[in-house]
Image (cartoon, rainbow, N blue to C red):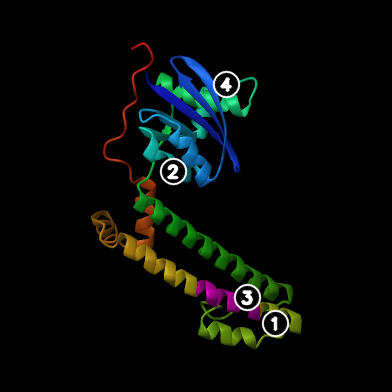
Amino acid sequence: MRRVIGLDIHRTFAEAVAWDEGRLVRLGRVDMTRTALEGFGKGLRGDDEVVVEATGNAMAVVRVLSPFVARVIIANPLQVKAIAHAHVKTDKIDAGVLASLRAAGFLPEVWTPDAETERLRRLVARREQVVRHRTRIKNEVHAILHAHLIPRCPHADLFNRRGRDWLVRQPLPPDERAAIERHVRELDRLGEDLEVLDREVAQAVIDDPSIARLITITGINLTVAAGHRIRHRKHAQPHRHPPRPGK
């Protein structure tokens, strides 16, 4: 008989509940380590389905458990919450809800990316973090200048060669000048990181025909095209819901 395992995932453990022939059976807690998850997976059946909610470590759980079961499914947590209303919430109840919704064919799934798309997502996310960090540092330099009534830089970019030459000539207290020097060094380091990430993103997508079409549009470079790809790429053939119990 078909069995569905719901895993309510936390940072250090997961609560496991099985839907088995219309009954919910608690399987216990599983530590969130590769060794513990592999041990749990070895105790499952090859035709089992496992359901987890989308969390920061959900994809790692999918990768570890997939070899042991028929399928590991990621559920949309907001839609699950909207569908299932429990007056009492515990880890066991949450895991049981996931298993029951899947068994009934009502589980709102999240598309699971392939390994290459997952890697590209990480690269693009890291690049965005570097860009945001650089913006914060630039804003801090502007705030220092503003605090000491330094007029706006006459050059288009305060942080290019001409802008930096202008910056070092401004009258600032020694501690503020030292702070700006630290910020500028950090900007240079982040710029190097950004170049490395840009190369890695480009290498990951350069042979993708959809990327080649996107970059023919004015204003779209490889990085923008890569971000579009990971937001919109889906499996060509989505999984069908299994039959409901008794059907």
Query: Does residue 238 show up magenta in the picture?
Result: no
Instruction: Kindly identify which residue carries mark 2.
Output: 64
- What kind of residue is marked 3? His
Instruction: Kindly identify which residue carries mark 3.
Output: 183
- What kind of residue is marked 2? Val
Instruction: Kindly identify which residue carries mark 4.
Output: 85
Q: CA distance from mark 2 to mark 1?
A: 51 Å
Q: Secondary structure at mark 2?
A: helix
Q: Give the vertical position of 32 relative to 174 (above or below).
A: above
Q: Earlier in the sequence, mark 4 or mark 2?
A: 2
- What kind of residue is marked 1? Arg
Residue 2, given in percent of the width and then of the height, sits at 38, 21
Residue drawn at point x = 32 percent, y = 65 percent: 203
Residue drawn at point x = 72 percent, y = 76 percent: 149
| Cβ atoms under marks 3 and 4 closer than 8 Å | no
Mark identifier at residue 21: none
